[in-house]
Each structure stands twice: as structure tokens, then as C-alpha cells.
Amino acid sequence: MTGKIYFIGAGPGDPELLTLKGRRLIGEADLVIYADSLVHPGIRAFARPDAEIVGSASLTLEEVWARMETACAAGQTVARVHSGDPSLYGALHEQLVRCEAAGIPYEIVPGVSSAFAAAAVLGAELTVPGIAQTVIFTRRPSRTDRPANEDLRALASHGATLVLFLSVAAMSAVVADLRAGGYPPETPVAVVYRATWEDQVVLRGTLADIAARVRAARFTKQALVLVGPALDPALRQHAADRRSHLYSADFSHLYRQVRRQEDSGGE
């Protein structure tokens, strides 16, 4: 009998942001392997008392895979717990390749991305009518290469909301690329360190000053960089000008027709 592997998104940090399905599957698993450098240790409490729990931060892909393959060969259930959502910078692809080659069934359980947790922390909508309707998730190249057509300056030319993962250590270079791509120096920027964790920190600024603020805070990892006009807190002063059509009284859609005042014949 072959077991099954569940790739579970643990969310950004706060264990309460784990989905109900993710929590249930962790509680049913015989083997829980979690990214202990990024996933909150509180998720361990959701596992069965007799489950084997392994942190993966110090393991190679081959070592992680050997444990999962052995468990599945014994008919066991594996919860492979990733930070955020597994589909974003989750080192998921190479594990799925091995599952399919070995004929081991698997399922991916989405999680709350740190990008959306950061937006919540900032009290911001990343897509504001008339300001930004596109969100780009990306990162600066480091030891992991990036396709040439995904140059940060080219992406910046769209003027959309940008969310940069794994890039805060090169903040000065990020700013230089964004400025070269067309963002003006007054473009709002927010840096959220360890969103929803107990030691969460938020920095706000613009492209003109954010690099200095990041240096002063000594952020080198586990921080998201969000850029774009949709992040401007001053937009709250123009809420009436930026409202969605969805709930507008003069906008019809499948579930609501415009209510037109009938002419009663009076003056």
C-alpha cells in the first residue's frame, strides 16, 4: 500500500492563519516535515502525539525525499509543510517531479502567502481602481538565476504594484533598478519583516529613503518589499474617487440591477 504526501502551505507565520484543511491533515499525518527556519513552531502542536516531526532546514532535498519515500512505502501519510503558499518560491517543483517519477500520490494544499499577510498588516489593497490593477510577484537574482526577460527594470516599467520576495538584502540595488525602470522617487514603499510573527516590523517610506531605513533596521532576510502607488496611505482621502464598480448603485451585474427612480408625474 502506497502512502500519500500532502504539500501544505502553513501561511506567513501566525499559526492561526493555517487553513482548516491544512491543520486537519497535519493532525492526521504519520510524518510531518516542516521548514523550521520559516514555519512557526506552533504548527507542531497540531500534529498527533505519536507523529514523527522533522525540521527540514538543515536537510538536503535528497534527505527530505528519502524520509518521505520511506514513509509512503510503509503506507503512511506525510505532511510536507511549507511557509506561505507552496506555489510561490516553495521549492515545490523538484519534489513533485520525484513524486510523479516514483508513482507516489500527492496533493497541494494552498496557504496564505506572506504577500497577502503583508498587505493585511499594511491595511492596504494591492489593486485600487484607477491606481493599480496588476500585481507582480518577483525577486532579484542572487544564487538562484532569473530569466533575462524578467529584469526588474523592465517589470518596473509597468508601474504596477510590485511584491519582491528574497530581495531586502540588496535594497539599494532594488531601488536603483526600480528608479531606472520608471518609478519616480516619491513612489510609496513598504517593507514588512516577518509578517504576522511576534517580532513583526513594518517600515514605510518612498524610493527616495527606503534603502537607508532598511540599512538602519539591519534587515537582511525574511522581509517583503512592496512598491507602488496603491500603497500610499493618502489614498484613503480619495476613497470616493477610487471605489469599485461592484458595489456602486449605478452599476448593474448578474446579481443586482440598477434601481431607477420611477417618474411619478409630480413636480
Image: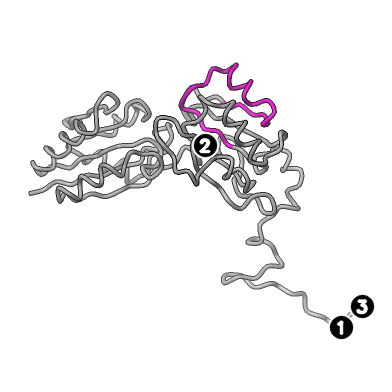
Q: Nearer the viewer, residue 172 or 133?
A: 172
Q: Nearer the viewer, residue 131 or 199?
A: 131
Amino acid type of the residue tagged 1 in the rendering: Gly
Per the image, the residue denoted by label 3 is 267
Residue at 20 percent across and 40 percent down: it is 78
On screen, residue 245 versus residue 59, left or right, reads right
Residue at 63 percent across and 61 percent down: it is 246
Q: Nearer the viewer, residue 162 or 249?
A: 162
Q: Position of residue 18 (x, y in %)?
A: 38, 39
Give the position of the C terminus as an image quadrant: bottom right
Residue at 64 percent across and 73 percent down: it is 257
Residue 177, label in figure? none
Asked if the residues shown at circle 2 and circle 1 are in contact, with their CB atoms under 8 angstroms apart, the answer is no
Per the image, the residue denoted by label 1 is 265
Which structural element holds mark 1?
loop
Magenta run includes residue 198: no
Q: Position of residue 27 (x, y in %)?
A: 25, 38
Q: Marks 3 and 2, Cα distance to the nearest angstrom? A: 59 Å
Outermost residue, right side: 267
Examine the rendered structure and indicate whether residue 129 appears above or below residue 166: below
Amino acid type of the residue tagged 2 in the rendering: Leu
| Range shown magenta | 202-226
Asked if the residues shown at circle 3 and circle 2 are in contact, with their CB atoms under 8 angstroms apart, the answer is no
Per the image, the residue denoted by label 2 is 164
The picture quadrant where one finds residue 244 is bottom right
The picture quadrant where one finds residue 203 is top right
Asked if the residues shown at circle 1 and circle 3 are in contact, with their CB atoms under 8 angstroms apart, the answer is no
